[in-house]
Image: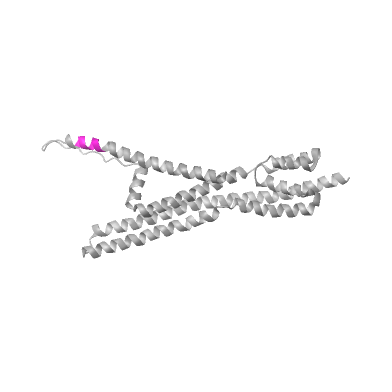
Amino acid sequence: MKKLISLITLAGLLTFATATFAQDETTEEQAAPAQTEVAQDEPAAGDEMVPEATEEKPFHQQLKIKIIEGGPIFMGFLLVALILGLAIAFERIIYLNLATVNTKKLLTKIENALNEGGVDAAMEVCRNTRGPVASIFYQGLSRYPDGIDMVEKSVVSYGSVQMGQMEKGLTWISLFIALLPMLGFMGTVIGMIGAFDAIEAAGDINPAVVAGGIKVALITTVGGLIGAMILQVFYNYILGKIDTLVNTMEDASISLVDILVDYERKANN
């Protein structure tokens, strides 16, 4: 299920990017005949020329131009790394949001089920509730016949397993965060090498010759840094969400043990 969500998210991002570029190309093709007609209708010499206001291009068209100017190869690598990182980040966010439950309400249901139908009824409540907290409760309740100590050990052990599942994929996000600036800096180095090669071929330092290589260098660097910053924001959000869930699981596990202690005391009396 989690892999399916990741694939759907990645496919959606790729489809959106492809549709945006296709729309830009269609707009440019439609604008070409209009520019030809305007050129044919140019006033003859001596007619009064009226200056026209320069129309500013939309942001996505400017972004497309900068990607092309930065070099398709390196900018393509940057886009692929960014899209993959975002796909994993969105999958983690969806998973963590689905894993969030109202622990107070769940503990109340478990306590009522214990009083009415015993441990089996409480386990059924946990089985019908989604999220890692309910899974930890289920494992703890299944060890109740072995004593409260086994319940505590089971809760701690399975809590570590659930924490590992919540942190799955974070290493890939951190990899893309580190990889994006590296790809950008590599494009910078290659762009500067191209600029010096152009100077060597021309035999003279011409600003027009050097500008192309320097532009590629700067665009790839900016692209890598922006992509890394975007992924860093999602990465920190996911870490904060995991910390909140872990604190909730620990607090709820203590409450579950207290409920079982009270239930055992009532059963012995």
Farthest residue to the right: give it.
269
The x and y percentages for residue 11 are 46, 43
Inspect this view and state whether residue 87 appears.
Answer: yes
Instruction: State left or right for residue 159 relative to residue 194.
Output: right
The x and y percentages for residue 26 are 32, 38
User: Is residue 72 placed above or below 110 in the rendered structure?
Assistant: below
Instruction: State left or right for residue 245 relative to residue 173.
Output: right
Q: What residue appears at the point 50 percent right and 53 percent down from the top-left corner? A: 232
**Magenta part of the protein: which range?**
32-38
Q: Quadrant of the N terminus?
A: top right
User: Residue 207, located in which quarter of the rendered image?
Assistant: bottom left
Tell me how many marks there are.
Answer: 0
Q: Quadrant of the C terminus?
A: top right
User: Residue 217, located in which quarter of the rendered image?
Assistant: bottom left
Q: What residue appears at the point 50 percent right and 45 percent down from the top-left corner? A: 7
Q: What residue appears at the point 52 percent right and 54 percent down from the top-left corner? A: 172
Taking depth in this image into account, of 9 and 248 the one nearest to the observer is: 9
Taking depth in this image into account, of 88 and 112 the one nearest to the observer is: 88
